[in-house]
Image (spheres, coloured by chain):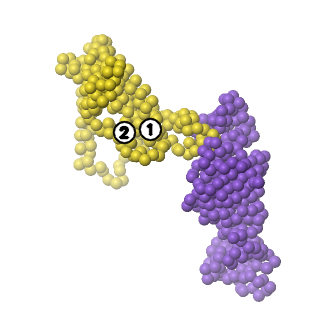
Amino acid sequence: MSALSLDLEVPGRVHAVLDADRGDVIAVIGPNGAGKSSLVKALAGLVPARGHATLDGVDLTGVPTRERGVGMVFQDQLLFPHLDARHNVAFGPRARGVPKAEALRRAEQWLTRLGVDDLAHRRPGELSGGQAQRVSIARALVTEPDLLLLDEPMSGLDVGVAASLRIELARHLAEFGGISLLVTHDALDALTVANRVLVLDGGEVAQFGTPDEVTQRPVTDHVARLVGLNVLRDGTELRAFEPTAVTVDLNEPSGSARHHWRGTIVVVTPHGAAMRVVVHVADDGPELLADVTPAAAVELGLSVGRVVWLSVKQTSVRSYTAPS
Amino acid sequence: MTDPLGRPPVRLLVPAALGTLLLLLPLVTLVAGTPWSLLGEQLASPELREAMWLSVLTATVAMTICLVLGLPLAWVLARVEFPGRGVVRTLVTVPLVLPPVVAGVALASAFGRTGFIGEPLRELTGFSLPYTTAGVVLAHTFVALPFVVLSIEGALRTARREYDAAAATLGATRWLTFRAVTVPLAMPGILAGIMLGWARSIGEFGATITFAGNYPGTTQTMPTLIYVSINSEPEAARSLSLVLLVFSIVVLVALRDRWLVAR
């Protein structure tokens, strides 16, 4: 039996069914309004929900938030502004009846593990965003929850700060041993931190699988865009191919390429060492991505408004079926 | 500095200046007319000191009661959703607009010798609230509680509810959250509410004199002493008024960050 088994509905917001085992780190991704935050808030008991969420055989629905054994990390941290970092982290153990000296000792231990022990006596107002988020992760983990919920912990941080925090978070979540749900809108989080990815779309589960499955065979446009993949949909039949596999020509290709489209360039931007060209396929077709070398971009005179032909070899196309 | 939108019109400036003058002139004449040479002697008079002590005592006791009753009431209004919450909030504000003398009559009807609660209370214990120091405290509490509740409720509303949620995920009961998170975060607003109520209580006249009378030593506070001395000893009335003015200014200065800073 799975450690976590849920079939939970926040009316009008989200409906999710999923099973997870101890040690799982589940990235929850999806566009704004997909219900990501509602799902984790429902698991924390902060919004009313229908259905069930069984953790180690105990149904959490109906259990008040404070008795759920759930840890939560909020996007804006919500560290108590009147307490220093140490007392913020000690708050959970204190609330659960741990004597003060022991609670402070555990707090200091966790601040050390998160690498912010030198900031123990600072108040949240004196911490940077990255430091505050480390303290808030320590505050959630010190209570040794069975389920850790992280609601976009990395958004709002500088790119560099988020990158180093992501690496550490991956390590702490791997050591954590419980189940983690990480709401994010960054494909990197899903790839580097999680071992499962839950894709929400329009309040429903669109896909649930390993990071490889989800990024190689995405079923939603949102994930396709997040991972920078071209995905064409024909009913439940999907075809995916990398932008680097796409060839750009000014004339209709005559070779063996089975897939080709005519369209207008809408964006040209640098992408790593290449130039990424976004083409709006004619007759209200999809938007496709193509990566070309800067030299080729200059030679072909690729600029916004230019009409071009895109083609891709059959061998570069992955065909798969969307789960119904 | 010239305003790029043009000079403020005279027809607005003149009434504005007159209004300022109307507010300031009586205060200036009060200060100017204070019999400074007699001030020390008057402030030392046992009658005045008794009234001043009684005012401070009753206002402080009344504020303690306002805190014990008003803080929970403000919390319930700010944090608990229940049917009729709007009605309760409106009812709490009624004494705010009630003429103080009416408040005194209303208190008498409830707690007077033959009042709804006053009569059984007197029959049971022999104790009667009107014309006692406890009666003064009751009048002050009745008049000041709405100020305290509304002011604290505002402070509790600005302390974000999300902190309550964060505390709950950490295992805190609502009582612990109230004590360890909500109250410390709202503390500046709570103190401001108490200060405001205290100032209202120090100046309370109508309800006090109606319900508790004006007996030196037991129910005669500063305002009621001023009232009786204005005819017999006008200089003493002025000295007393100056003391109350200083009280008010101290409260104003203490609260200036909350009330005077334009936002």
Q: Chain of mark 2?
A: B
Q: Chain of mark 1?
A: B
Residue drawn at x 66%, y 69% is A221
Q: Position of residue B102 (x, y in %)?
A: 25, 33
Query: Looking at the rendering, in which quadrant would you find the C terminus of chain A?
Result: bottom right
- Whether residue A113 appears in this view of the structure is yes
Res B170 → quadrant: top right
Name the N-terminal-most of marks 1 and 2: 1
Q: Position of residue A143 (x, y in %)?
A: 69, 40
Query: Which residue corresponds to mark 2?
Result: B92
Residue drawn at x 36%, y 29% is B141
Query: Which residue corresponds to mark 1?
Result: B74
Q: Which colour represents chain A?
A: purple
Rendered view: A313 above or below A198 = below
Q: Gap in Å between the C-alphas at discs 1 and 2?
A: 10 Å
Q: How many marks?
A: 2
Crowd class of label 2 (few under 14; some 14 to 19; many from 20; radius 10 Å): some
Which type of secondary structure does the marked residue at label 2 adopt? helix
| Chain letter, yellow | B
Query: Looking at the rendering, in which quadrant would you find the N terminus of chain A?
Result: bottom right
Question: Relative to residue A138, is residue B232 drawn left or right?
Answer: left
Residue drawn at x 64%, y 54% is A52
